[in-house]
Image (cartoon, rainbow, N blue to C red):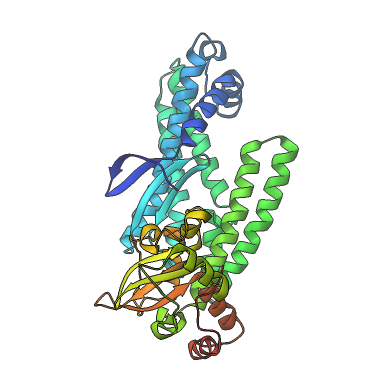
């Protein structure tokens, strides 16, 4: 979740995603356009004593709408700090807190797998929202009669923060309530299995939220339902992969150096294309002596026009800014590194920066499929040695 950094608090960067810049004025407009109606509801429910005519005059509705919208997102920010502070007390690193279209997200460097940690981290956010609501309600109660603006803004925020807490506690994984559900399930079953079950519940809630959004013409609810469904599926998949690759290292999965197809810097691009066709590979390490100097892919070769490929060498098109992993790196970390850098394969280098192998996304997926059917790293290695020995095509 990328965004513009606007500050740091407790060592945590605070970011604003570009969607926040759209939804903030939208919320301000929606609240401002309904100020009179909201004031009437608050008068009926809490005896607020707000003068609807006073808060609906001139530019007052839009000022109150903006103040309420800012206060609402301030409450969301405190909600995320609730998660983050508890997580940091347990030793987890928080990469950032980002405000965006659907509220806020605290980005963890590592998700907790201890059910007690996850339970208290998840529940901390809604508890903070209830606390913020309670503080706003105290201000609302202490405000003098006739202070219409104060009564409106703090009464509205008191209500909205409690609603936010209740809504977040719905067991729609990966919302807070869904994470609480997973933590409870993980008490008596493997974390990956608990994730799968919590994600299944989350998808059901997402389906009904989407239906409700369609029938009530609530676009944000439809977007939220879509987000919950996709996020639940994605995290369930990541957790399953992490469980499958537990204790599996890059060395268990990689194609070793002696089995690799490599090219040299002075290989022509035309020759490279012919080798790709004959050997059915789309990426090669580039070797100078015993040292790795680059990687070249089909996309690199295609950047040269066909009529000029005899005149260009691999050194002209190869990638030299490489991201590598060590053979002792765990397989899940290698997969995450590929995803973060948008690459399909990684060179495997030893402590002397010598090439010892290559690992590709298809290698990892093959290993995952074998492990899912009861295989072990030794079986994976055996199957790889029985293959043609080259990096996979994907």
Relative vertical location of residue 64 with respect to residue 360 in this rendering, above or below: above
Q: Between residues 20 and 59, which one lies in front from this camera angle?
A: 20
Residue 135 lies left or right of residue 235; in this view the side is left
Residue 36, given in percent of the width and then of the height, sits at 59, 18
Q: Is residue 247 visible?
A: no
Q: Is residue 372 visible?
A: yes
Residue 93 lies left or right of residue 180; in this view the side is left
Residue at the left extreme of this rendering: 352
Relative vertical location of residue 6 with respect to residue 393 in this rendering, above or below: above
Residue at the right extreme of this rendering: 215
Q: Residue at x 51, y 11 (%)?
A: 54
Q: Residue at x 50, y 18 (%)?
A: 62
Residue 96, given in percent of the width and then of the height, sits at 36, 49
Residue 264, given in percent of the width and then of the height, sits at 37, 71
Residue 137 lies left or right of residue 32; in this view the side is left
Image quadrant in which you'd find residue 347: bottom left
Image quadrant in which you'd find residue 330: bottom left
Number of labels in the image equals 0
Q: Residue at x 57, y 70 (%)?
A: 277
Residue 310, given in percent of the width and then of the height, sits at 46, 61
Residue at the top extreme of this rendering: 58
Q: Quadrant for the C terminus, please.
A: bottom right
Residue 51 lies left or right of residue 315; in this view the side is right
Q: Residue at x 51, y 14 (%)?
A: 55
């Amino acid at each position: 979740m990328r965004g513009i950094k606007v500050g740091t608090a407790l060592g945590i960067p605070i970011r604003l995603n570009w969607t926040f810049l759209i939804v903030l004025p939208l919320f301000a407009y929606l609240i401002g356009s309904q100020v009179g109606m909201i004031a009437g509801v608050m008068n009926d429910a809490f005896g607020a004593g707000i003068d609807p005519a006073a808060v609906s005059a001139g530019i007052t509705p839009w000022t109150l709408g903006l103040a309420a919208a800012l206060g609402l997102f301030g409450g969301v920010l405190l909600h995320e700090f609730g998660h983050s502070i508890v997580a940091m007390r347990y030793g987890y690193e928080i990469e950032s807190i980002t405000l965006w279209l659907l509220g806020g997200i605290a980005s963890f460097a590592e998700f907790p797998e201890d059910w007690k940690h996850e339970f208290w981290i998840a529940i901390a956010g809604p508890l903070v929202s209830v606390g913020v609501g309670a503080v706003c309600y105290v201000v609302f109660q202490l405000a003098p009669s006739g202070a219409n603006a104060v009564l409106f803004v703090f009464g509205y925020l008191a209500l909205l923060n409690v609603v936010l807490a209740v809504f977040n506690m719905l067991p729609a994984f990966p919302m807070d309530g869904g994470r609480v559900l997973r933590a409870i399930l993980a008490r008596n079953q493997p974390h990956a299995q608990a994730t799968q079950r919590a994600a299944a519940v989350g998808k059901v809630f997402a389906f009904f939220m989407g239906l409700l959004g369609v029938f009530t013409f609530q676009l944000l609810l439809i977007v939220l339902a879509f987000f919950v469904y996709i996020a639940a599926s994605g995290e369930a998949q990541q957790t399953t992969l992490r469980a499958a690759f537990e204790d599996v290292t890059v060395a268990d999965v990689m194609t070793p150096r002696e089995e690799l197809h490599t090219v040299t810097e002075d290989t022509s691009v035309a020759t490279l294309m012919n080798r790709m066709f004959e050997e059915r590979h789309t990426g090669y390490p580039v070797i100078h002596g015993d040292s790795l100097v680059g990687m070249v892919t089909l996309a690199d070769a295609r950047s040269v026009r066909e009529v000029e490929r005899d005149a260009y060498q691999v050194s002209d098109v190869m990638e030299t800014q490489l991201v590598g992993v060590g053979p002792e790196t765990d397989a899940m970390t290698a997969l995450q590194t590929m995803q973060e850098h948008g690459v399909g394969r990684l060179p495997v280098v030893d402590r002397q920066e010598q090439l010892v192998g290559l690992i590709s996304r298809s290698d990892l997926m093959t290993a995952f499929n074998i492990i899912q059917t009861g295989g072990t790293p030794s079986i994976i290695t055996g199957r790889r040695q029985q293959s043609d020995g080259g990096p996979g095509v994907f």
